[in-house]
Image: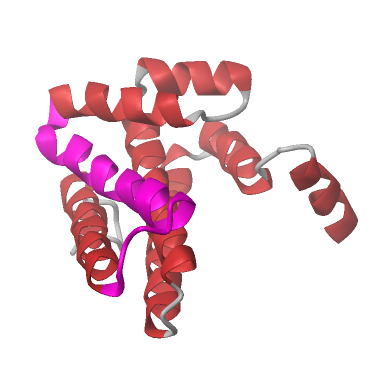
């Protein structure tokens, strides 16, 4: 099993995303819960990395949390970008950004703001390595607010704050 997963990942296949896409077809509520659970897991990992002063990994895990939240909202609200994802089988960064804009038009600017904070972690903390601990901590706090807002708005059983 591990070899299959490794080969898939080498080919650029996000195994978890594939499984969640299939689960969403059968049980959309469970898929939504799992995406939000993943966002919480990534946030927890980001905080652990931050405690070790690993700014790069903390930034990427914070981005991953924001990414899962945009995917969850896109699934829930069946955005045009989500429909494209189901046809193509993968998300692109631009599609996530575009979906965040679409969602903001329905839910409010907090969606795009949440996405931007996560994306800033990805670009400036992970790729560029330009952020210091305090800036990463601040942005992680904003991503955590984004995750908690989604829990509250969606009122997913067992996840609401």
- Look at the magenta stretch and give its main secondary structure: helix
Q: How is the image coloured?
A: secondary structure
Q: Is residue 97 visible?
A: yes
Q: Quadrant of residue 76?
A: top left
Q: Where, by quadrant of the figure, is residue 3 drawn?
A: bottom right
Q: Residue at x 50, y 40 (%)?
A: 27
Based on the picture, tell me whether residue 132 belongs to the magenta stretch: yes
The number of discs equals 0
Can you say whether 37 is above or below 9 in the image? below
* Residue drawn where x is 24% and y is 54% of the image: 151
Q: Image quarter for residue 67?
A: top left
Relative image position of residue 4 (x, y in whole percent): 86, 49
Residue 59 falls inside the magenta stretch: no
Q: Position of residue 32 (x, y in %)?
A: 41, 45
Residue toward you, 54 or 83: 54
Give, as a single range, the part of the protein colored magenta. 106-133
In this picture, residue 92 sits left or right of residue 4: left
Residue at the far bottom: name it. Answer: 52
Q: Is residue 13 left or right of residue 87?
A: right
Foreground pick, 24 / 144: 144
Residue 92 pos. (x, y %): 51, 28
Vertical order, 133 against 147 (above or below): below
User: In this view of the protein, which residue sits in the foreground, 96 or 22?
Assistant: 96
Note whether residue 36 is visible.
Answer: no
Residue plotted at (32% across, 62% down) = 131
Quadrant (top left, top right, bottom left, bottom right) of the C terminus: bottom left
Q: Is residue 17 left or right of residue 63?
A: right
Q: Quadrant of the N terminus?
A: bottom right
Place of residue 160 in the rendered image (x, y in percent of width and height, measured from the top left): 22, 60
Residue at x-position 71% and y-position 38%: 13
């Amino acid at each position: 099993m591990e070899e299959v997963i490794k080969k898939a990942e080498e080919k650029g296949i996000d195994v978890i995303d594939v499984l969640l896409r299939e689960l969403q077809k059968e049980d959309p509520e469970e898929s939504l819960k799992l995406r939000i659970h993943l966002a919480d897991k990534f946030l927890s990992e980001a905080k652990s990395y931050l405690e070790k002063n690993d700014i790069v990994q903390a930034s990427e895990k914070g981005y991953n949390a924001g990414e899962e939240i945009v995917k969850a909202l896109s699934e829930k609200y069946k955005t045009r970008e989500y429909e494209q994802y189901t046809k193509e089988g993968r998300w692109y960064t631009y599609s996530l950004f575009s979906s965040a804009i679409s969602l903001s038009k329905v839910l409010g600017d907090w969606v795009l703001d949440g996405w931007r904070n996560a994306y800033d972690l990805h670009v400036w903390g992970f790729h560029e390595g330009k952020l210091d601990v305090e800036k990463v901590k601040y942005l992680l706090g904003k991503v955590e607010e984004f995750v908690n807002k989604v829990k509250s708005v969606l009122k997913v059983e067992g996840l609401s704050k």
